[in-house]
Image: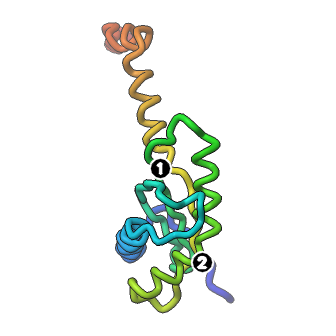
Amino acid sequence: MPRKKTITPHAGQRQLRVGEELRHALTSILAEDRLSDPDLAGKMVTVTSVRISPDLRNATIFITPFGINQEPKAAETLVRALNRAAGYFRGEMARMVEMRVSPQLRFKIDDSFETANRIEALLHDPVVRADIAKPREDKDDE
């Protein structure tokens, strides 16, 4: 009987290590600014994290662009351009990071900072502050 595959929700140590090494490699490739695509030329991008599949064949790269946070269309254009150049990045990474197989790359905007800012704003909302400041009733009455 074939073994049943289990999907673990947490990345293993190897995935984290390889993801971090790929993040460093991508950061240095982007810093060189040798890209000929006009949508990428001169753009400042931070690679916030890299999530890699358990078999190390697929990687999702989360980025945060500088200076275009107010323009969502510009961020989408940047992600499309990065995904177009994924083959170039994959080749450069294969030279920098020693792996058996260079992973397929997919770029996405990292929205975790926006989510954190939204939660922070909600916590500072006067209605929520008043709700938090209410004294809790003890359950000793039961």
The residue identified by callout 1 is: 65
Q: In the image, residue 34 lies at what x, y percent?
A: 47, 72
- Looking at the image, residue 18 sits to the left or right of residue 101; the answer is left
Q: In the image, residue 45 lies at what x, y percent?
A: 44, 55
In the rendered image, which quarter contains the N terminus? bottom right
Taking 66 as reference, is 89 above or below it?
A: below
What residue is rendered at 44% in x and 21% in y? Answer: 122
Query: In this orientation, does residue 19 appear?
Result: no
118 and 79: which one is in front? 79
61 and 78: which one is in front? 78
The residue identified by callout 2 is: 87
Label 2 is placed on what type of residue? Gly
Label 1 is placed on what type of residue? Pro
What residue is rendered at 53% in x and 79% in y? Answer: 90
Q: Residue furthest bottom?
A: 100
Q: In the image, residue 15 lies at what x, y percent?
A: 42, 73
- Looking at the image, residue 138 sits to the left or right of residue 83; the answer is left
The quadrant holding residue 58 is bottom right
- Looking at the image, residue 40 sits to the left or right of residue 13; the answer is right
Q: CA distance from mark 1 to mark 2?
A: 20 Å
- Element type at mark 2: helix
